[in-house]
Amino acid sequence: MVSREDMSTSFGRAAEEYQAGRPEYPAAAVEWMLQPVVRADHRPRVADVGAGTGKLTRALVEVGTEVVAVDPDAEMLAALRTDVHGVPTFVGTAEKLPLPDASLDAVVLGQAWHWVDPTAGSAEVARVLRSGGVLGLIWNIRDDRVPWVARMTEIMHGSNAEIMIAEGGPHIEAPFGDLDAAKFEWSRPMTAERLLAMARSRSYLITAADADRARIEGALLTLFAELPELADGGSIDLPYITHAFRAVRP
């Protein structure tokens, strides 16, 4: 049986598929997370932890923050550096950040807090944040209210993140208090090729046995063949709900 730790550090093996298949983050959701530390006379300094290939890093740059990227996987950081230029990168985790005390206005994690030990992670994030700084957590979750999307999720298996969101959301601990939450609905056009890349970027498929992976990919291709929008290289809108959370360090 594949361990949770092995799954959490598996993504570097599929960095190319991750970059091709995973969605970006809506600017409105990123701005909402950072709102408590945004001032006209100050450029927030932010760490993107669990940065992966830089999906959230790029969004942070685009909304005007000064960003450093942290990830446990050097392969993912290498992919980030080719796509998001000029951002310092560090190997590390939310439980052990290679950053000084009280040096940041915000720490954000995209598709990552469900891999974190909430007690150790909360304490370590609080260490590197200034008083009044923000812990921001964000997930892009496919909208399974759409029948074909629900079928795709059933074939791929629900992720740890999807299960956590369905069960009420992330858990954080002292010194942080309650999390504020917001949702943002949107969609992105996807070809069959990009949908398959998205599936291959998920830890369940990355760590699956060859026979299981082939079975899942075959079932996905059968589903895609039933969607007329995907015929002849066409695209279909994949709906998302972005779940964003924030808490302020006392």
Image (spheres, helix red, strand yellow):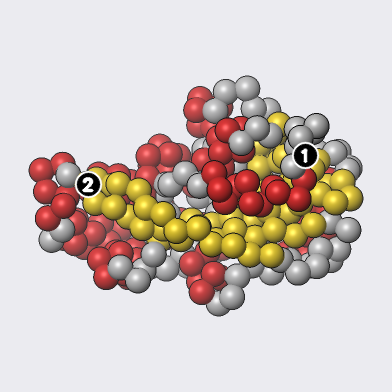
Residue at x 19% of width, y 62% of height? 223
Residue at x 41% of width, y 58% of height? 240
Q: Secondary structure at mark 2?
A: strand
Residue that protrudes farthest toward the bottom in the picture = 167
Residue at x 79% of width, y 57% of height? 248
Are there few (<14), some (14-19), or many (20+) residues within 10 Å of tag 2?
A: some
Say which residue label 1 marks.
39
Labelled pair 2, 1 in contact (Cβ < 8 Å): no
Along the line of sight, the residue nearer the viewer: 212 or 186: 186
| Observer able to see residue 14 | no
Along the line of sight, the residue nearer the viewer: 143 or 198: 143
Say which residue label 2 marks.
235
Residue at x 28% of width, y 47% of height? 190
Look at label 1 and name its amino acid.
Arg
Q: Position of residue 10 (x, y in %)?
A: 50, 50
Q: Is residue 157 left or right of residue 48?
A: left
Q: Secondary structure at mark 1?
A: loop
Quarter containing the C terminus: bottom right
Q: Position of residue 170 (x, y in %)?
A: 64, 67
Discs 2/1, front: 1
Along the line of sight, the residue nearer the viewer: 207 or 149: 149
Count of residue discs: 2
